[in-house]
Image (cartoon, grey):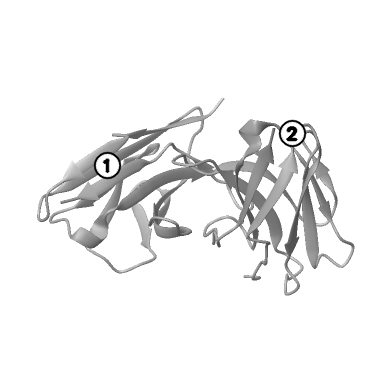
């Protein structure tokens, strides 16, 4: 499974878009990119996932580069409740999700 | 819609005591089920997963065991807890291949 690299922390002003990057340069063709977030003392929450095409749901958008070596999670209008640790995972299937250290996003009022 | 329940939310146990954590899923059938542990400030470590009743795969050797007596019930057990068993235990479910996992609220286990 591909290793992912994320910045350890980011800040975002409330109401602005939060763009969280992830590098997965060794990703293989059948590996999906999953994004989860974990708010302190809670279980991880699934956000979005994709293979090749950009994806959008009610929570976020996922932009995957054409070579699939990196992706960006976009929270269009960040709120204080979006403060959490965000995990990017590149994996075949979903049977063993390796959660690294993620990006700690702090939304600032 | 599907929901996942874990209990208890917190648990304090003495060293050497037994453990039983329960997880149930509603609103779906034949889910894949998972037990993870998260140490303080660390990522999640997969302990067990199950693709069906009575089918358990262990990812990490330890003094914990898992059982799946019913389709939507997953139990994590230990006969004698160690101090190193402290942590945040999370249960999750997913549909079939390439479907995302959905997590419960977790059990925070402290061993004294």
Kindly report the distance in space between the C-alpha atoms of the residues bearing marks 2 and 1.
Answer: 39 Å
Quarter of the image where one finds residue A4:
bottom right
Outermost residue on the front side: it is: A109
Q: Give A5 or B73, whichever is nearer the viewer.
A: A5
Residue found at the far top of this picture? B1
Q: Is residue B99 visible?
A: no
Where residue B57 appears, as percent x and y from the top left, is 38, 61
Identify residue for label 1. Answer: B21
Q: Are marks 2 and 1 in contact (CB under 8 Å)?
A: no
Residue pointed to by mark 2: A14
Q: Is residue B108 above or below residue B5?
A: below
Q: Please tell me which residue is depicted at 46% across the width and 39% down the height of the picture.
A: A42
Between circles 2 and 1, the one closer to the viewer is 2
Residue found at x 64% / y 63%: A92
Task: State which chain disc 2 sits on.
Answer: A
- Residue at 64% x, 70% y is A3
Badge 1: chain ID: B
Pick the quarter of the image with the C terminus of chain A.
Answer: top right
Q: Which of the 4 image quadrants contains residue A38? A: top right
User: Is residue B35 visible to the viewer in this orientation of the structure?
Assistant: yes
């Amino acid at each position: 499974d591909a290793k992912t690299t994320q910045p350890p922390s980011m800040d975002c002003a409330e109401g602005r878009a939060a763009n969280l990057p992830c590098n997965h340069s060794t990703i293989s063709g059948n590996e999906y990119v999953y994004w989860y977030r974990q708010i302190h003392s809670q279980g991880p929450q699934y956000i979005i996932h994709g293979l090749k095409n950009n994806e959008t749901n009610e929570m976020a958008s996922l932009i995957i580069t054409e070579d699939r070596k990196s992706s960006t999670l976009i929270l269009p209008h960040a709120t204080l409740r979006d403060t959490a640790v965000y995990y990017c995972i590149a994996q075949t299937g979903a049977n063993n999700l390796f959660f690294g250290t993620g990006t700690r996003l702090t939304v600032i009022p | 819609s599907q929901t996942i329940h874990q209990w208890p939310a917190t648990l304090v146990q003495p060293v050497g005591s037994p453990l039983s954590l329960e997880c149930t899923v509603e609103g779906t059938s034949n889910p894949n089920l998972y037990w993870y542990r998260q140490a303080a400030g660390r990522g999640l470590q997969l302990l067990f997963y199950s693709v069906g009743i009575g089918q358990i795969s262990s990812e990490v050797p330890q003094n914990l065991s898992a059982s799946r007596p019913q389709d939507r019930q997953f139990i994590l057990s230990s006969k004698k807890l160690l101090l190193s068993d402290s942590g945040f235990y999370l249960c999750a479910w997913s549909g079939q291949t390439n479907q995302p996992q959905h997590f419960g609220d977790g059990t925070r286990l402290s061993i004294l």
